[in-house]
Amino acid sequence: MENIIFEVNHLNLFYGEKQALMDLNMKIEKNAITALIGPSGCGKSTFLRCLNRMNDLIDGCRVEGEILIEGKDMYNGDMNVVDLRTRVGMVFQKPNPFPMSIFDNIAYGPRCQGIKDKKVLSQIVEQSLQRAALWDEVKDRLKDSAYGLSGGQQQRLCIARAIAMEPEVILMDEPTSALDPISTNKIEELAIELKKDYTIVIVTHNMQQAARVSDYTAFFLLGEMVEFDMTSVIFQNPKDKRTEDYITGRFG
């Protein structure tokens, strides 16, 4: 690992008195897909939300330790959280298009950043939808409501909406858990394509998905990161028995 975008050092997270993440240390590589796996409630989504400080929005949440993004501490007072969330976009478990047209969903973020020129906005919308492998399916109905799209199309629309902000990183929190197998396959192919230009961190319950798409995998259990390595090592030659037990289906 040479091109590091995130460096996590002694990260602990508390919800009130309850500790949810325990002494996490890892480095996340640029232009790679890192998968976070583990049973429900193990801390993987909580950790994902640390990477763009979404946990700030939860009452009583406290973070200790540090997360560096390209060498800068995300949790010190100088970090502009709005800028951070522009650099680190997010796609959620259930597609969450805005109640507006397909075009306006994509143009919303750039407009908030002050881009008003219709030609520029049209370019951003087309490029974002093309990158999200959705353009050909929607180019003739950009004025239609986003709610008219299928679940899989809505999720690709949400990825396009994130791309429109020109992030460096896209966080995906179980992006295919609400989708059918064909839509899931499209999102997986898209993730592999997108890593040429973006860093992707994906939380998944689906171990086959982690094995198919990711370059690195971290296994979480009870708030602890048990093991983190290249995906091939985690799935074929894990060093920790707990990792092996989870991957072979003995629990989880």
Image: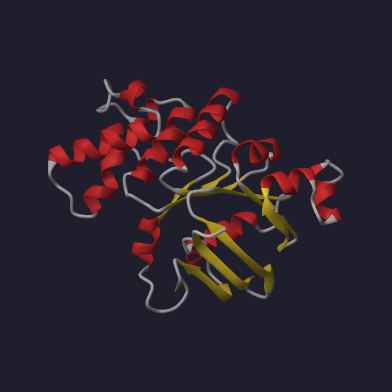
**Identity of the residue drawn at 49% across and 59% down:** 3
Residue at the extreme front of the image, as rendered: 2
Whether residue 191 is visible: yes
Task: From the viewer's perspective, tell me whether residue 67 is left or right of residue 122.
Answer: right
Whether residue 101 is visible: no
**Identity of the residue drawn at 75% across and 44% down:** 235
Front residue of 240/93: it is 240
Residue at the extreme bottom of the image, as rendered: 77
Residue 152, given in percent of the width and then of the height, sits at 49, 29
Count of numbered circles in the view: 0
Task: From the viewer's perspective, tell me whether residue 238 is left or right of residue 113.
Answer: right
Is residue 201 shown above or below 155? below
Residue 122, given in percent of the width and then of the height, sits at 20, 35
Residue 178, given in percent of the width and then of the height, sits at 58, 34
Is residue 97 shown above or below 244? above
Residue 251, given in percent of the width and then of the height, sits at 84, 46
Residue 19, by quadrant, is bottom right
Is residue 234 shown above or below 71? above
**Identity of the residue drawn at 70% across and 44% down:** 232
Front residue of 70/117: it is 70
Front residue of 61/233: it is 233
Is residue 250 shown above or below 72? above
What sort of colour scheme is used for the picture? secondary structure
Residue 218, by quadrant, is bottom right
| Quadrant where the image shows the N terminus | bottom right
